[in-house]
Every structure is written in C-alpha cells, then in structure tokens.
Image (cartoon, helix red, strand yellow):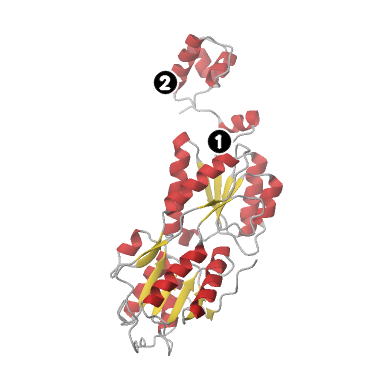
Amino acid sequence: MKRPTMADIARRAGVTKAAVSFALNGRPGVSESTRRRILAIADELGWQPNSAARALSDGRAGAFGLVIDRPARTLGLEPFFMQLISGIQAELSADGTPLLLTVAEDQQAEIDTYRTWSGQRRVDGVFLVDMQVEDARVAVLEALGMPTVVIGAPIGTGRLPSVWSDDSAAAHTALQHLAALGHRRVARVCGPAHLRHTEIRSAAIDRLAPALGMECTTVATDYSADEGAAAARTLLTRHDPPTAILFDSDLTAVSGLTAAQSLGLRVPEDVSILGWGDSALCELVNPPLTALSRDIAAHGGHAARLLRLAATGARVADFQDEASRLVPRGSTGPAAAGAPAARPVRPASPAAPEPVRARPAAD
C-alpha cells in the first residue's frame, strides 16, 4: 500500500504543498480552519512524517539507539536486558520515540555502528551498556558529539552521564547475608572479567570477604546457562567445595542450582545458592532463589529520560538509582557443619572455566 504523502493531502484538501507543510509543522501561513482541515485529512490518510526528511530539515532523527555486544543466542535468554529494554521502550513510547536495537559481534563492530548512525543521522542519541575496563567507545562517542547515557558506574566514562546502581554495596549485602548464616567457604560465579561491573563487584568482595572471615573463590563465565552450570560443577566437585555460591546473574544461578541438584546435593542444606538479579526465573525453580533485587525496568526508564534530556543539548548529571536489596527465599540457609562433597563427574562441555582471583578495581 502506497505511503500517503503531503502531495496526497494537498490534493485532497485543495491547497498547496506549502500550506500542508505549514499546517503539519505548526507554522503560521494558513488559517486555523484550514489547519484543522489539513490535520483531519492527514489523520484520515494515516500520514506519518518521513524521519529521513525530518533529519535533513532539522537535524533530528526522532529515534534513539542501543547496541549490545553479546552473542544473540545468550542475549535472548538474559532477563536483565529484557527488563532493561522494556523499561527504556516504555518511557520512549510515551511520545512515540522508537528504539533502534542491534547486536554487534565485538566492540569494533559496535563502534562502526555508531559512526554509521552518526553519519546518516539515524539516531539522536545512544545508550551505552556493558562498560569495559579498557573501553574505546567513550572517546569515539565524545568525538562524534553523539548524546550518550551510560548504563553503569561513572568510572572511565569521560564526560558522558551515567545511570547507575552501587554494585559494591550490593556485594556487601550478599556476603553479609551469607556470613550471618555461618558460611565461611564461599564461591562466586561472575561474568566476563573485562566488564567494569564485574571488576567493581570483585574488588568489593576481595575487600570484604577477609573482614568477615570468609574465603571466596571466583570463576569467570560468559553469563550463559551452560557456563554457569559448568562452573557450579567445577566448584562443587572439589575436595573442599564451597558451602555457598553467589552467581552474578539469575540465569547462571538457576543453571547452577540445577547442576547442584544433579550432583545429588540438597539446596540449601548442602550448598546455598544466591543470585544477582531477581527476574521471574528466581521464583520458578525449587527451591526459589534468594536474590539481590532492584527494579531494572525503572532503571531503563531513568536512562531514557536522561537521554531524552541530553539530546536537547542540556547538560545532565549522573543519576544514582536505588541500591539492590536482598530478597531471602528458600535457596539459602545455615552452613552445614562438615557439608558433604558432591560425587565427582566428568568435565562438562564446554570445559568448565578455571577458578580465578578477581583483580582490584582500577582507580
């Protein structure tokens, strides 16, 4: 079906294209009665402004962008991003602003996308996620003059404003909960070590665990369910398995719970499981997962409001969102004295990652 144009509206209304343009753009040059008639005809025909033409006329694309550098196969299962995107979209839909979403294979591909969007004026600003310890994107976006809001801690973000929640405080909350239950030998299954939020959490745990009399081993994964399960099996089949495991996402926590149970271990009697993130997944398993919880959709909405403001040219400051709170459920309990080790199993495929010690966060 042919898209209606201003010429179609002009023919129907019996006026010039210039008069239609004046009416649709709220400019003087036509009478109020003519303006109302033109707007009614445009609505009847289902006319919508041409975003490309608008970008050429006033420099605005009328859309915002989000590029995610994660494998598409894992992204579709990741509750955090689904909630974040839903919050962003809910805020943007209030005035009909679309979100242009794409997946990149690596950081260079992501940067290439920003350059293309900027050159073609495809978006008025972007959301920057998954900040890395060594991150080339900040300098590129600053050089492009692209309005940007970082969703993450304001560390290494240059002049770009951030919407963030205190991961260090959340790590303290999780460890203090486990320490109060008597756990002294614990483990953590984290995401990729090059991500800034992984480093912040690791540094906080490295500082607090010794103060609580705890030993904490960290295993890095790619956030996939397969690697979460493999990491749990590696930890639980050691000669000195942990009595509690903290997972950096609820997807890996659910897979870790399943892995523990497949080894014949009881949760929480033999091992406690705690997840970082509190999607519906946490309540669909048995026992339901204790989790660090916050409103991720609202977090996305805050970022969208900040980006909308930044796109007007206004100077915006960092916004610190609410801290995560602990929601106790059935997957954590007192540490059992002399908790039994799981029976050994053959290595999973893909091979389980080796335990690593997290490095302190960079200044």
The kind of residue tagged 1 is: Gly
- Left or right: 126 as drawn, with respect to 266: right
Mark 1 surroundings: few (<14), some (14-19) or many (≥20) residues within 10 A: some
Percent x, y of residue 97 = 50, 37
Q: In front: 46, or 266?
A: 266
Residue positioned 55% across, 39% down in the render: 63
- Left or right: 262 as drawn, with respect to 226: left
As drawn, which residue projects farthest toward the right? 143
The kind of residue tagged 2 is: Glu
- Left or right: 18 as drawn, with respect to 94: right
Residue positioned 49% across, 71% down in the render: 190
- Left or right: 4 as drawn, with respect to 116: left
| Res 346 visible | yes
Secondary-structure class at tag 1: loop
Percent x, y of residue 327 = 35, 64
Marks 1/2: CA distance?
23 Å
The residue pinned by badge 2 equals: 44
Residue positioned 35% across, 79% down in the render: 271
Secondary-structure class at tag 2: helix
Q: Quadrant of the N terminus?
A: top left
- The image quadrant of residue 260 is bottom left
Residue 184, above or below 74: below
Percent x, y of residue 331 = 32, 72
Tag nearer the camera, 1 or 2? 1
- The image quadrant of residue 264 is bottom left
Query: Which labelled disc corresponds to residue 260?
Result: none
- The image quadrant of residue 286 is bottom left
Residue 21, above or below 332: above
Q: Who comes first in sequence, dot 1 or dot 2? A: 2
The residue pinned by badge 1 equals: 62
| Res 352 visible | no
Q: Quadrant of the C terminus?
A: bottom right
